[in-house]
Image (cartoon, grey):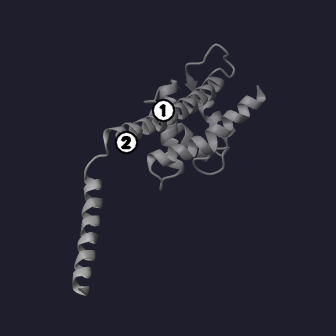
Amino acid sequence: MLQDKTLTQDSQEADTVAMTNALAIYPPKPATHRMTKAMDSTVTSNRKMELAETKSKLREIFEYYASFGDRLNKKLLYNGKFFKILVDANLSLTGHVDSLENRKSSDIVFSQVNSNKSHMPFEIFLHSLIRMGEMKYPHYGAGDALKAVVNGYMLPLYDKIMNKT
């Protein structure tokens, strides 16, 4: 009798394990799947909105510095203005933010991402942020380094600019 109870418990446990495995293998029912998909879509759309807002802020920084001293220019950023962004953001790639060493690193990034042209458009500026992140945080992945530069330096610079104007 005791042996029968043990066998029954063992078979119930086996059934439970089999059911858990089956649920893990087979997709959820369509209604649940639609709800999950809708939730994913909401998260994705919220994330897209955040990214669009961040990109808009980066564009405002870019245009602010591009037009500095040339109010009609909002499309191209020159090397000196690129360095001014780094100084104003307090972003040091190497050494002190105002140092010659940091200036040289800034020049290198500007030249590398911009194919040695004298000015860069906004899209190339975005690539420069990735490169700066990789230099500033070599132990991070490119995505994490970019987030660190944007959240730690560029967005505070945006707030500083908006408080001035």
Res. 30 image quadrant: top left
Q: Classify mark 2: residues with Cα within 10 Å, few (<14), some (14-19) or many (20+).
A: few
- Type of the residue with mark 1: Ser
Q: Position of residue 143 (x, y in %)?
A: 46, 45
Q: Residue at x 57, y 30 (%)?
A: 53
User: Residue furthest toward the front?
Assistant: 1
Mark linked to residue 45 = 1
> How many angstroms separate mark 2 from mark 1 (CA)?
20 Å
Residue for badge 2:
32
Q: Position of residue 138 (x, y in %)?
A: 48, 53
SS at badge 1? helix
Mark linked to residue 60 = none
Q: Residue at x 46, y 30 (%)?
A: 114
Q: Quadrant of the N terminus?
A: bottom left
Side (left or right) of 96 relative to 147: right
Q: Residue at x 68, y 23 (%)?
A: 68
Res. 63 image quadrant: top right
User: Residue furthest toward the right?
Assistant: 164
- Type of the residue with mark 2: Thr
Res. 11 image quadrant: bottom left
Q: Position of residue 37 (x, y in %)?
A: 39, 37
Q: Residue at x 26, y 86 (%)?
A: 2
